[in-house]
Amino acid sequence: MEIIQAGRVKVNGRIVKEPSMPVDGSEEITVDNQKIGAKEYTCVMLNKPAGYTTTKDDVHAQKTVMDLLPSSMRHLAPVGRLDRDSEGLLLLTNDGELAYRLTHPKFHADKTYLVRVKGELTKPKQAKIESGVFIDGSSSNRTLGPQTGHSVLKPDTRRSSQELAGARKTAPCRITEVKYNGTDTEFKITLNEGRKRQIRMMAKSVGHYVTYLCRLSMGKLQLGDLPKGQWRTLTKQEVGLLK
């Protein structure tokens, strides 16, 4: 504040004495005629394989997504959640504002996943998931795995949704490209929330166990043909698609 009021700060060669002057990062800013470098932001896309924990640092995780990046990228942090058993598009960045826009529900950033479940996901069950189901209740996340040799889990009907302690209804989502092969159902689901193990819990709420889960896109950004376990830096144009 004092150095600004003392006239020591210039923006594009002009002295600035108003601290609230807006800048967008494209300006040349100097203090005592010495240029200040703008912080450089990096955003990379990783095709996360299953078996890697999405965390920057976890002593309990055998393998983390950071193990797939070179040491020069260790300053980046994962954007949002993608559980250990899931794979697909994962962004890592040091741009806190971008990460906030992609993860906060108020920005409605769509994310599309390819999902495979045991059994037939019937149209009534699809409609139920699309309209919203109650999850995050007192039922433990640890019950999400296969409990028997049957292809379909038994839905939790012991209590109504409203009675599940702490349960919250999921926001409306969209299910498309549903294919049932007689044993499993494969479909795409697009949602703008990112709650812990959300898709797995949504499937469980209608009696199905997820056997495969892959994130295909975030907003207008597509995973494309990036090989599993590989990463690449996003272009400025691609970052622009996320804002």
Image (cartoon, rainbow, N blue to C red):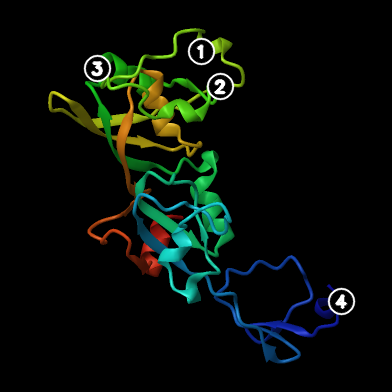
Kind of residue sitting beneath label 1: Ser
- State the residue in front, 122 or 211: 211
Please state, as top left, top right, bottom left or bottom right, where the N terminus lies in the image.
bottom right
| Mark 1 vs mark 2, CA separation in Å | 9 Å
Tell which of 26 and 58 is nearer to you: 58
Check disc 1 and report its element: helix, strand or loop. helix
For the residues labelled 4 and 1, the Cα–Cα distance comes to 57 Å
SS type, badge 2? loop
Mark number, residue 137: 2
Residue at image position (28%, 22%) is 149
Where residue 127 sits: x, y (%)?
A: 32, 18
Which label lies toward us, 3 or 2?
A: 2
**Cα–Cα span, label 2 and label 4:** 52 Å
Question: Which residue matches tag 1?
Answer: 161
Give, as a three-letter code, the residue at label 2.
Gly
Question: Where residue 115 sits in the image (x, y, percent)?
Answer: 29, 36
Q: Amino acid at mark 3?
A: Lys
Mark 3 neighbour density, 10 Å: few (under 14) some (14–19) many (20 or more): few
On screen, residue 7 versus residue 184, left or right, reads right
Image point 40% across, 32% down: which residue?
199
